[in-house]
Amino acid sequence: MLRGIIIRAVGGFYDVRAEDGTEYRCSARGRFKKDGTAIYVGDRVCITPLFGQEGVLDAVELRETLFPRPQIANVEQVVIVCAPQNPQLSLQLLDRLLVLAENEQLRAIICMNKEDLPHEEAKQSLRNLYENAGYLLFMTSAKFGQGIEELKQQLCGRISVLAGPSGVGKSSLLNCIQPGLKLRTGEISERLKSGRHTTRQVELLALDCGGLVADTPGFNQLLLAAVSSQRLPLCFPEFFSFAPQCRFNPCRHRSEPDCAVKKAVASGKIGESRYKNYLVFLDEVLTQERRY
Ligand SMILES: Nc1nc2c(ncn2[C@@H]2O[C@H](COP(=O)(O)OP(=O)(O)O)[C@@H](O)[C@H]2O)c(=O)[nH]1
Ligand SMILES: [Mg+2]
Ligand SMILES: [Zn+2]
């Protein structure tokens, strides 16, 4: 018996990377199908090697987390990639991804790629908003190889997923971090793909420094479906130190009197765009809840 992690699912088979680094193509035991056991990329498993690089999946270990989109088990951190331009920086999309990560209690770090493009304004607002909220912020240029080592350090030994809009350079960054991956890059092919609704399989890529990372295709829309209105305020870490001073507990920080979070926004201690996006999301999740 060998322990390993499922890195890919292909046509009813599971590719498992064993602890010694060998990959095995495994079929699942019939009983998994019979008792309807869900098996995801990222699951830790036990396998029995057969001949060559083939094996049988014997057991699936208890899953710690399941990242919703794409579905990957046991992800520890989300690297949210953005760019100062091309595509234009969307703070709302960034906040949305941060909320999704926080809601799953995953570590989130932010990477502004395309540092070679004019970026002073974007960098300043990212610093003010997100370093204040306690997030690690990295500046990179996949084009010129800048900041790659620092970002790589964050990926080594962890299971991560790269998220962010199409065209910001996620695949390019991974190609820099791990030469030899040869991931397809380029906005045009990406757009065509999403236009044709081709689903790309998720895959965990192994890094030489240890650790696994999933590249994700772009998305058009990202709903906060799994987030409740009670949890939403807890997905904004910079609210934590103020919320206990609100008159109401729990407080939605919207129309409640004597709200310490609103006061902190007014005095500039909490970023205005963060708070504005919080209100947008609150509306969204309340509407969702009313529907059910
Ligand atoms: N100027 C600049 N262009 C980049 C950089 N990184 C990626 N690109 C380009 O941006 C486009 C999208 O890159 P890609 O890696 O496919 O983005 P993804 O959709 O996030 O995976 C490609 O044309 C890349 O060559 C960078 O650091 N600077
Ligand atoms: Mg890509
Ligand atoms: Zn409040």
Image (spheres, rainbow, N blue to C red):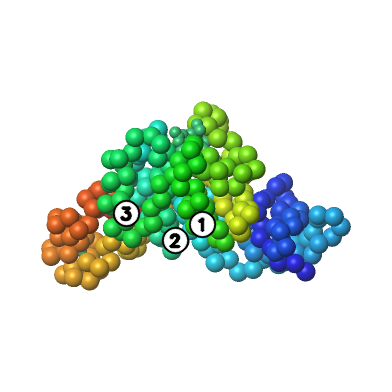
Marking on residue 130: 3
Per the image, the residue denoted by label 2 is 107
Identified at 73% across, 52% down, the residue is 13
The nearer-to-camera label among 1 and 3 is 1
> Quarter-wise, where is residue 226 in the image?
bottom left
Q: Secondary structure at mark 3?
A: helix
Identified at 53% across, 40% down, the residue is 172
**77 horizontally vs 214: left or right:** left
The first of marks 1 and 3 along the sequence is 3
In the image shown, does 207 or 289 lie closer to the viewer?
Answer: 207
How many badges with numbers are in the image?
A: 3
Per the image, the residue denoted by label 1 is 153
Amino acid found under the numbered disc labelled 3 = Tyr
**Measured along the vertical axis of the image, is residue 58 above or below residue 160?**
below
Amino acid found under the numbered disc labelled 2 = Arg
**272 horizontally vs 193: left or right:** left
Q: CA distance from mark 2 to mark 1?
A: 15 Å
Residue found farthest to the right:
51
> Quarter-wise, where is residue 22 in the image?
bottom right
Q: CA distance from mark 2 to mark 3?
A: 14 Å
